[in-house]
Amino acid sequence: MPPSSLTPGKRFPDLDLPDHEGRPRRLADLPGGDPLVLCFSRGWWCPKEQRFLRALVELQSEFEVAYARIVVVSVDEPGVQAAFRAGLGARFLFLSDAERRWLGPLGLEETTDTTHAPYQPYVFSLRPDLTIHAAYAGYWSFGRPTLEELRTDMRAISRDIRPDWEL
């Protein structure tokens, strides 16, 4: 279960982090009026993360034409993220919290990994205003959302925010 501040109906904090190219970004600027899947990743080195992010890459073309976004946050340095992103063939954005500024405030510390001090693998479906629609705890792989669950979340949000959903 996510911290009580990160549950459906609450607004996700407006993170300020560099992207995989080192450019400063604000989370609130990223949706651009579209629904957003926000993934917190342990890092490139974790085989579970590699598997899950490869699945997200399968979804990226569908998200692009459906006007939905994907953003990944990890403690990897921007250069490492850029290489990992390129290796995956991902076109979506990676944000780096290598300094671990948001790890404690979000309450998403992975306490069982004292070597890397990464994020717990959580996935959030967000409305464009960063209101949390759904939260998935992925410490165990089967806790992560399936691609179909993410599609269902994006459909529900899109139906709610698009005035022309039904012509």
Image (cartoon, helix red, strand yellow):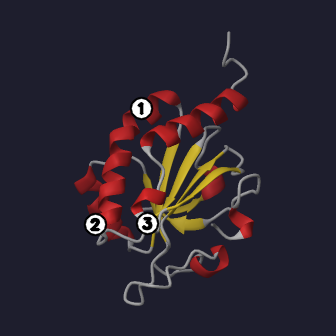
Q: Is residue 81 left or right of residue 146?
A: left
Q: Which mark is residue 8?
A: none
Q: What secondary structure is marked by label 1?
A: helix
Q: Residue at x 67, y 14 (%)?
A: 166
How far, Cα to Cα, is label 3 from label 1? 26 Å
The x and y percentages for residue 74 are 45, 69
The x and y percentages for residue 58 are 33, 40
Q: Is residue 99 left or right of residue 161?
A: left
Dot placed on the residue nearer the N-terminal end, 2 or 3 = 2
Q: State which quarter of the image contains the C terminus.
A: top right
Q: State which quarter of the image contains the N terminus.
A: bottom right
Q: Residue at x 42, y 48 (%)?
A: 92
How far, Cα to Cα, is label 2 from label 3? 12 Å
Q: Which residue is mark 1?
A: 62
Q: What secondary structure is marked by label 2?
A: helix
Q: Residue furthest toward the top?
A: 167
Quadrant of the rendered image containing residue 104: bottom right
Residue type, label 2: Pro
The x and y percentages for residue 135 are 61, 56
Q: Is residue 47 above or below residue 28?
A: below
Residue type, label 3: Trp
Residue closest to the eye, 29 or 106: 106
Q: Residue at x 62, y 65 (%)?
A: 15
Res 120 visible:
yes
Residue type, label 1: Glu
Q: Which mark is residue 140?
A: 3
Q: Which residue is mark 2?
A: 47
